[in-house]
Image: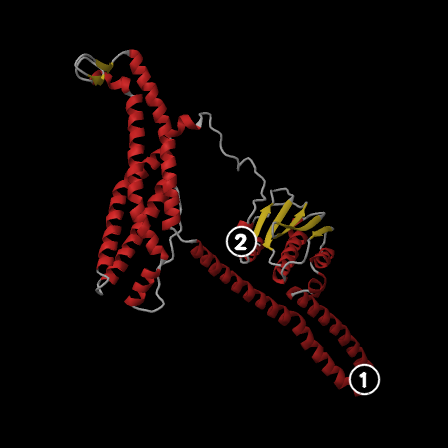
Amino acid sequence: MATDYAPRTREHLPRRHRVPAVLRAPFEGRAWRELAYVLVGLPLAFVGFSLAATTLSLGAGLLVTFIGIPLLAGGLMAMRGLGAVERERARALLGLDVAPPRPARGAKPGVMGWIGAVLKSGVSWRHLLYGFLHLPWAIFSFVVATVFWSVGLAGFTYPLYAWTAPGDGGVLLYTDLSHEVRLDAPVAMLLTSAVGLVVLLAAPWVTRALVSVDRFAVSALLGASALDHRVSELESDRGVVVDTAAADLRRIERDLHDGAQARLVALAMDLGLAKEKLTEDPEAAARMVDEAHGEVKVALQELRDLARGIHPAVLTDRGLDAALSAIASRCTVPVQVEVDLPARPAAAIEGIAYFTVSELLQNVSKHARATRASVDVWAADGRLMLQVSDDGRGGADASRGSGLAGLGERLDAVDGVLVVDSPAGGPTTVTAELPWRG
C-alpha cells in the first residue's frame, strides 16, 4: 500500500478549461480515437472469433489423432499474436498500456516442450476466451456508437441539407394514403437540429462507456496476470538485492583494507622494530610500544565502527528508538527523534529502517546546510513509516541517480516506498514506507 506524500503544487493541478467538458467532448481527439477503436474493432473481432472457433473445433476434433495437439497449440499461439495486435491498438487509440504476458517456455527443450508450455499456459486460454467474447460485444458497441454519432451528426446538420430532399421538400418521416409528415418547416428543422445536438454531445460519453468494457477485457484477458507481475517484480528486486549485497561486501573489504588492515600492518611493523630495539635502546622501544598501544585503540575503534555499519549491537539489543537516537547524536545538526511503535517489527525491516535513517541523516550532515532535523517513526495500517525532515536548502532529487535513487531501490526490493519532497530553498521531507512483517 503506497501513499503519495508529495503536496499538490500548481503544476500537479489539472488544467481548467473555459468550455465545459460536455460541450467540447465531440471535438476532442480522444472522442474520435475511441470511435476509431470501436469501428476498427468489429473486423478484428470477426477475425479473432473465426480463429478461436477454428482453433477449438479443429484442435478438439482432432485430439484423437496426434495432429490435433500441435494444431491446438499453433492456434493458441496465433491467438496470442492477435492479442498483441489488440494490446497495441488499445495503446495507440485508448492510451491503455497493458504489459504483455510472459512468453510460453517449456520445462523441456524442443518442440514438444514448447507445445506443452503453450497448452498449459493460462495466458493462451485467456486469449482464446477473448476471441469468443469480443465479437458479440464488438457488434453491440459498433451498432450503438455508429447510431449515436450518425444520428447526432445527421440531426445537427439537418438544416444544411434539407433542401436536397426530393419531392415537396424536407425529409419524409411518415406517410399513408391520406397524409404525410415531412421535416420542412423552420421550427421542425430547428427542433431536429437541437435533438441532433443533444445526441451528438452524448455520443462521446456513450462511446467512452462502451470502450471502458474493452479496457477491462484487454487488461484482464490479454495482459500479464498478477502472478506474472509479481514474478517480474521479484526478479527485479532480486537483482537489486544481489547488487546491493555485492556493493556492501566491496565496501566492507575496502574499509578493512584501507582502514583496520593497514593500521594493523603498520602496528606489526612498529612492534617488530620495538622488539629489535628492546635490548639496545629500551627507552626508544618503550616509546614505540606506547605508540603501538595507541594504534591498537584506533584500530579497535575502526573495527567497532565497521561492525556498527554492518549491524549495530544497540539495534539488536534495544530496538529502533535507542539505535536512531545513537545515530542522531553523531549528526552535525541537532536532531529530534520520535519513535512511536506498538512493538518491534521484523529484524530485517528494522535493519533497513535503521540504515535508511542513517543514510538520510548523513545527507543532512553533508549536503543540506540545515540547522536542525527531525526523525519520526510510527506504525500505520500494518506498515512501518519513517520520516526525516530538515530545514536545509532543499533541491534533493532521487531521479538524478543520487544516493536517494539507490535508497529507493533498496526499499522497493522489500515492497517499500521512498517519497522525496524537497523544493528548491527547502525544507526537505523524505518519507519511507516499509512492510511491518513482525
Position above or below: 211 against 352: above
Which of 317/64 is in front?
A: 64
**Residue at the spot of label 1:** 281
**Residue at the spot of label 2:** 401
Instruction: Give how far across and how far down residue 414 sits, in percent.
Output: 55, 58
Quadrant of the rendered structure where residue 258 is? bottom right
Q: Are marks 2 and 1 in contact (CB under 8 Å)?
A: no
Position above or below: 201 against 239: above
Which of 302/175 is in front?
A: 175
Q: Is residue 436 visible?
A: yes
Measuring 32% from the left and 48% from the top, which residue is drawn there?
130
Instruction: Give how far across and how far down residue 386 sits, in percent.
Output: 64, 51
Position above or below: 145 against 393: above
For label 1, the SS is loop
* Dot in front, 2 or 1: 2
Instruction: Give how far across and how far down residue 320 sits, in percent.
Output: 69, 58
Quadrant of the rendered structure where residue 22 is? top left
